[in-house]
Image (cartoon, rainbow, N blue to C red):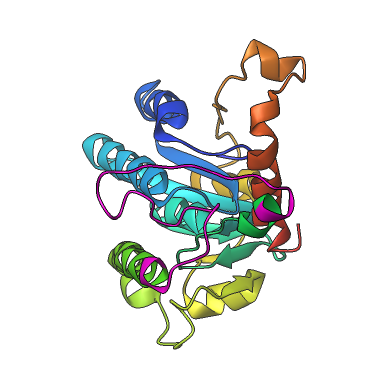
Amino acid sequence: MQGRSGLSDETLGPVIEKAFRRGKPDAVALVINSPGGSPVQSSLIAARIRRLAEEKGVKVYAFVEDVAASGGYWLAVAADEIWLDGASIVGSIGVISASFGFQDLLERHGVERRVHTAGKSKGFLDPFLPEKPADVKRLRGLQDSMHQCFIAHVKARRGDRLSDDPALFTGAFWVGQNAVELGVADGIAHLVPKMKEVFGDKVRLRYYGPRKSALSRIGASLASDALAGVEERAHWARYGL
């Protein structure tokens, strides 16, 4: 579960299924490098991991590379143990929504946008209209509900390993040993040495990952992806990456 592309259950589901079902593994290790994404996709992937782990009786280890934050941390928590590099960033247990406001830009260029709806909420948070306090209030209510789901997931998985630090569920994030001290991770370790420590020097590791499309392999992209790419870059930049 690494890379700078968005994670989805559709993409990762077959990979996760293969990791759990092929060759009767003693354990499954997740390599995570993600600043977050869709809370629903994170929840679906995490639920799949837990279902397969329980069906197969397989322990799951998560190894964080640069960052496992927000939705990335949601995935990490699906593991039984979370291991970090000393400089890994983890946490950001919260929900964020970001968009743009274009109403002044349209006005300056003499552009009139015409939208007709049936249902007073169909224009909710329209980026081409001035922001409405009622829309912002409703959005915060939706975010609060998602945040509570995230908190419940973390508490259920980490249990009494979590500290009682009041910043734990504020959206803050931590680096390396600080995260371990707060209980959001279990220790500092890398994939191969840790697996050898647990299973012996003769342990065999099989790597699985999503296949890239032909367009991706030759570096092609679509113009419609440009704004999504900027937004994704902003997610990484939030953690200084």
x and y, in percent, of residue 234 in the image: 69, 55
Give the residue at the far top of this rendering: 214
In the drawing, does residue 86 fall left or right of residue 125?
right
Q: Is residue 153 above or below residue 123?
A: below
Look at the image and tell me whether residue 4 can be seen: no
The residue that appears at 65% across and 47% down in the rendered structure is 232
The residue that appears at 67% across and 60% down in the rendered structure is 85
Q: Is residue 181 above or below residue 63?
A: below
Image quarter of residue 2: top right
The residue that appears at 56% across and 30% down in the rendered structure is 204
x and y, in percent, of residue 78 in the image: 38, 52
In the drawing, does residue 110 fall left or right of residue 25?
right
Q: Quadrant of the N terminus?
A: top right
x and y, in percent, of residue 86 in the image: 70, 66
In the drawing, does residue 195 fall left or right of residue 176?
left
Q: Quadrant of the C terminus?
A: bottom right
The range drawn in magenta is: 107-135
How many marks on residues?
0
Camera-nearest residue between 240 and 154: 240
x and y, in percent, of residue 190 in the image: 65, 52
Camera-nearest residue between 194 and 138: 138
Q: Main secondary structure of the magenta part?
A: loop
